Image (cartoon, rainbow, N blue to C red):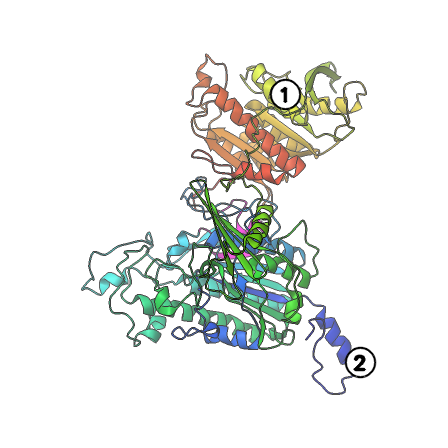
Amino acid sequence: MRLALLPLLLAGAALAPLQAAQDDARRPPNVILWVADDLGWGEVGFQGQERIRTPVVDRLAAEGLRFSAAYSGHTVCAPSRCVLMTGLHTGHAQIRQNSPWASKLHALGEGQEPLRFGTQTLGTVLQGAGYRTGAFGKWGLGAPHDEGRPLAQGFDTFTGYLCQKKAHDHYPPSLWQDGVPLSLANPGYTPSARLSEPPTDPATWARFSGEDYAEDVMLAAALSFLDEAAEAEQPFLLYFPTPIPHAALQVPADSLAEYADEGWDDAPYLGTKGYLPHPAPRAAYAAMITRMDRDLGLLLERVRERGLEQDTLVLFTSDNGATFNGGVDRAFFRSNGPFRGMKTTLYEGGIRVPLVAHWPGRIEAGGVCEAPVGFQDLLPTLGELAGVDLEGPLDGTSLVPVLEDPDATLPERALYFESGARQALRLGRWKLHRSLKNGRERLELYDLIADPAEEDDRAEAEPEVVARLRARMAQEHAPSPRFPHPEDPEPFDPRARGPLEVVRTDFRAKGREGGTIGSVIYQPKLRSDEVRPLVLFQHGWLGRPRDYDELCEHLASHGFVVLSNATQTGLVANPIIEARDTLELAEGLLRSERVLTAPVATTGWAAVGHSMGGVASLRLAIGSQSIASVCALQPGWPRGLDEVARALEAVDAPVLVLAGGDDRTCPPRRSRPLAEAGPPGARRLWGMVPGLGHLGPVDGRWQRGDLPADEAHGLHREVVLDFLLATLRGDAEADERLVRRRDGWRLGRPQALP
């Protein structure tokens, strides 16, 4: 059945009903995207599970379309979600592995690697198409309030766990709801404990539970969201990345009772493989999955009650294969079906997942799509259904043709995966595994049609196939500053001087109040008339001119034209005067016909400054619409910072504030509010560098800090250049370098205590 047509339910239908059907067909569908956590391919009834009951998912499969060769985005949580959100596989995605490094910016150490500001996601695409968007569950792509949070990535509302480590406890003391902690009636504890022997007191087990089961809370929020969207007659995206059945093994007593008489458990789980102990681990695991299935059923019942079944596309899947720890017995349940491997491996058991699409009246019941598909296909699929032209290259393809006809042919593409030094690529029937250990390459080749269990390695027998897939594998990988591969080329060094020769010219302009204002222009020698970005640099309080000169020359050697205002230095410097003078200098520069060797942009400038100059740069952004980004290095001023912070609440331009951990002149506590201020959608980056002093005179008390001066100046050059490349030139690799982990610190939105 074609998606563009509705069935004619009445024989001899007249033109008016047909027109109504066609009008309805053009309405973009509501979307419910339910993603289980660590649910194996074989843990649902429609794929052969005999012990765990999943009647709701089985009904969806029977009434809809199931994909027999569906793949997640990765073999572990965060990168798989990143692929799902962005339509880019892990050779191109921003997040390519789980990060054990919780955000140092958050007071409670909560969060993972963030999606960058401005990323095209499922949320932003459908939100831009007029959808109401809500996420409920485990996010795992940022920290509270940083640029990776759901509310900054296209979701109108979110209830759940932002940090996937916090999601290891299904009875947490709190969840996040729209940026604010939502307190629950649970004691809260680190979800890892070990018992030396089975306890005799039943109360021992009770301490590993609570009153408010997290999924119940998130489901209630999702049902309210659905009701509000239905009342508003607005299409919606309801994304439910449930934390179930990921360990710890925790489930309410009423669900556990459904499996109490199975007699599966001879001994309790004592926590010897991580997470929490449980008296009946097999029963608990099955009960968690059945409860998840029940909860999905409650959501679908609300869809039916609202009369939205015909208008709602339901997608059910899992983020990776079943796990090996926390008391989970995947062998007992045959969790990964006939496939080799498990979560954390790139064998089929780690990345092959259930996928069902259900849409009454649009998708015929009982269909099976055997074509290999992946998480990267969901963004282009939903984008097409919503009528959106997506930006930039994507690794996925729209699945609308197979929703219409399961036997339709999809465009040829490779399904690619990488995890550290391991890679896998499926192309047609063949799958190539590649690993590098201690610099030694190992290749395995499997024919997944003849050998889905990956037992017969054909690498030696099929060298031509290996060579072809090996070459394709190299094409699918792009270097990532945040997640480097052992074979990546030497990365670009933003501290190194650029390739362009720099011309340094003194420049003076008339001020509005009489007199002249002096400055220096740093211009790169270019052979073309390409319009170059303009950077307005503000000198600092007690800074050394030669250090600022080096920074300006560094930026110019990479293609920027830098106008440096050196007139307001010393103890009498004033950021208000400096900002005003700099704008007058910039206007005079644009009027000049003799100084510029090539055209510069008349708007979209950057403002950069150190110390007092950092405050002046922020004032430039407040007072001029021409400023497109601001980089304030260790900003400080004896008075007026609160006023500047308040004014920044209306500034949309990206702002980066760098503070020194040992800076007594401009301490972090004074500059941090400057990075916290801004509209909800504005980009704010903050970094507090341990050991960084103020960088004043070498022999003065202002210089004290553990970070050597040369290292500190190199850090300034690196951060400023990457920030300008990212914000003025849209350089994604520079943006990746900005947000990468450093020695004990990183750049990201600062976090306040909840």
Q: Which mark is residue 553?
A: 1
Q: Quadrant of residue 717?
A: top right
**In the image, what residue type sits under mark 2?**
Leu
Q: Position of residue 745 (x, y in %)?
A: 45, 35
Q: Quadrant of residue 440?
A: top left
Instruction: Please say whether residue 144 is one of the residues in the magenta stretch.
Output: yes
Q: Residue at x 29, y 67 (%)?
A: 280
Q: Seen from this angle, which residue lies furthest left?
A: 200
Residue neighbourhood size for the residue with mark 2, other residues' Cα within 10 Å, grouped as few (<14), some (14–19), many (≥20):
few
- Residue 637 in sight here: no
Q: Residue at x 56, y 17 (%)?
A: 547
**In the image, what residue type sits under mark 1?**
Glu
Type of secondary structure dominating the magenta stretch:
loop
Q: Which residue is mark 2?
A: 15
Q: Is residue 279 above or below residue 50?
A: above
Instruction: Please say whether residue 706 is one of the residues in the magenta stretch.
Output: no
Distance between the alpha carbons at the discs numbered 2 and 1 = 72 Å
- Residue 560 in sight here: yes
Q: Residue at x 25, y 64 (%)?
A: 268
